[in-house]
């Protein structure tokens, strides 16, 4: 059985062999250039022999082609980026928003990254990071909450453009070699948006996107970001797996396995234990997750709740890898 077949069986709860595992991180500065970003992923995933790759472009890649300017600096802990200048400065900018093409500009760079990775790691299942339409909108407009409440119909029309562009991009990365989509959402947690607004501007558009690409990707994982999340609402999405910060927020691995019948990616405490934990603490974190995965028919893929900080020492990653591989011998 190859890695993709084993992964797909795992997401269905049919893996009788052993728990799979993976880590992912940002590669700041070099993530602005597709060939360098591809090389960094290939080196990282070859070194640690993970079972699954999440491709992690810089976090503002979806908004560059609309006119946002990306800061040259990056977060010294997460490695993520931010906009130094957003393209939406007034509601009129939403009213005149034009569609962008996945075959040009920044989006085409990310597709090339996938293509280059596929050439060298064809055997490894890969999922490309795609942001929900509302997440993309929030990266473009620092006043999105105010604009949604004052001009909701305008924002809906503009988000339909974003949805079309995101769908085209997702289809292009699948064609380029990504077997899966890692669909990130930051809006199943408490924010300035009411739950009614989340339903209209996030959940509705997530469902539209999932309907658009149904049958085109081998698998789809939804990342539910943050603490105090509405996990049960996310569990209603028609996806193959959920990823969340189980070591920071409800539900636990065992609770989640009762709520969501398909795959789960979680188990590692990326914000604390992986950064400065003692070797035995890291080992205990891994083994606890392995044991919970085995109780859930191995449908839990041992993974972080989000990107691991770039400050995580290499020796800690090696501890995770060795602990999991040793657990497979027992």
Image: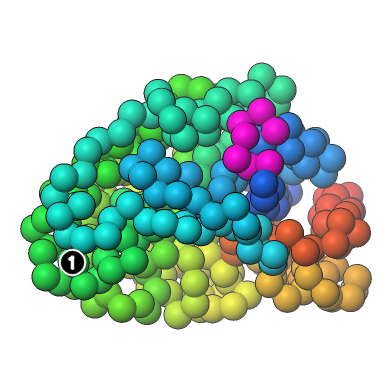
Q: Kindly report the secondary structure that dominates the magenta region of the rendered protein.
A: helix
Question: What crowding class fits label 1: few (fewer than 14 Cα within 10 Å), some (14-19), or many (20 or more)?
Answer: some
Q: Residue 322 is drawn in which quadrant?
A: bottom right
On-image quarter of the C terminus: bottom right
On-image quarter of the N terminus: top right
From the top left corner, tell me how far across and down residue 171 is, in percent. 38, 29
The residue at 62%/34% (across/down) is: 33
From the top left corner, tell me how far across and down residue 192 is, in percent. 31, 78
The residue at 33%/42% (across/down) is: 66
Judge by depth and name the residue closer to the eye, 69 or 110. Answer: 69
Residue 274 falls within the magenta-colored stretch:
no
Residue furthest top in the image: 119
Judge by depth and name the residue closer to the eye, 59 or 179. Answer: 59
The residue at 47%/58% (across/down) is: 84
Residue 230 vertical position relative to residue 12 in the rendered view, above or below: below
The residue at 70%/26% (across/down) is: 121
Judge by depth and name the residue closer to the eye, 310 or 200. Answer: 310
For this view, does 110 lie left or right of residue 300? left
- Which region shows up in magenta? 30-36
Residue 234 visible in image: yes
Q: Quick one: SS at disc 1? A: helix
From the top left corner, tell me how far across and down residue 282 is, in percent. 83, 70
Say how many tags the image has.
1
Q: Residue 107 is drawn in which quadrant?
A: top left
Residue 12 vertical position relative to residue 82 in the rendered view, above or below: above
Residue 165 vertical position relative to residue 314 in the rendered view, above or below: above
The residue under label 1 is 148
From the top left corner, tell me how far across and down residue 180 is, in percent. 50, 37
For this view, does 240 lie left or right of residue 13? left
């Amino acid at each position: 059985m190859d890695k993709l077949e084993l992964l797909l069986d795992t997401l269905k709860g049919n893996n009788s062999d052993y728990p799979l595992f993976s880590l992912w991180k940002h590669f700041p500065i070099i993530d602005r250039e597709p060939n360098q970003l591809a090389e960094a992923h290939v080196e990282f995933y070859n070194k640690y022999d993970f079972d699954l790759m999440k491709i992690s472009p810089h976090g503002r890649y979806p908004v560059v082609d609309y006119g946002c300017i990306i800061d040259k600096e990056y977060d010294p802990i997460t490695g993520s980026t931010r906009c130094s200048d957003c393209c939406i400065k007034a509601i009129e900018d939403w009213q005149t928003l034009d569609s962008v093409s996945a075959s040009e500009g920044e989006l085409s760079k990310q597709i090339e990254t996938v293509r280059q990775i596929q050439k060298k790691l064809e055997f490894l299942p890969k999922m490309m990071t795609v942001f929900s339409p509302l997440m993309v909108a929030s990266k473009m407009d620092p006043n999105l909450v105010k604009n949604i409440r004052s001009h909701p119909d305008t924002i809906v029309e503009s988000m339909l453009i974003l949805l079309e562009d995101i769908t085209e991009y997702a289809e292009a990365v699948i064609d380029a070699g990504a077997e899966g989509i890692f669909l990130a959402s930051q809006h199943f947690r408490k924010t300035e948006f009411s739950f009614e607004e989340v339903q209209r501007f996030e959940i509705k558009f997530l469902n539209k996107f999932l309907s658009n690409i149904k049958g085109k990707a081998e698998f789809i994982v939804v990342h539910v970001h943050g603490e105090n999340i509405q996990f049960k609402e996310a569990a209603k999405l028609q996806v193959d797996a959920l990823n969340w910060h189980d070591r920071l927020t409800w539900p636990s691995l065992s609770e989640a396995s009762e709520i969501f019948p398909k795959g789960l990616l979680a188990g590692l405490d990326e914000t604390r234990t992986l950064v400065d934990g003692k070797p035995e603490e890291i080992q205990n974190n891994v083994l606890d997750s392995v044991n919970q995965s085995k109780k859930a028919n191995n449908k839990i893929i041992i993974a972080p709740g989000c990107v691991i900080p770039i400050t995580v020492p290499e020796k800690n990653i090696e501890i995770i890898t060795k602990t999991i591989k040793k657990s497979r011998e027992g």
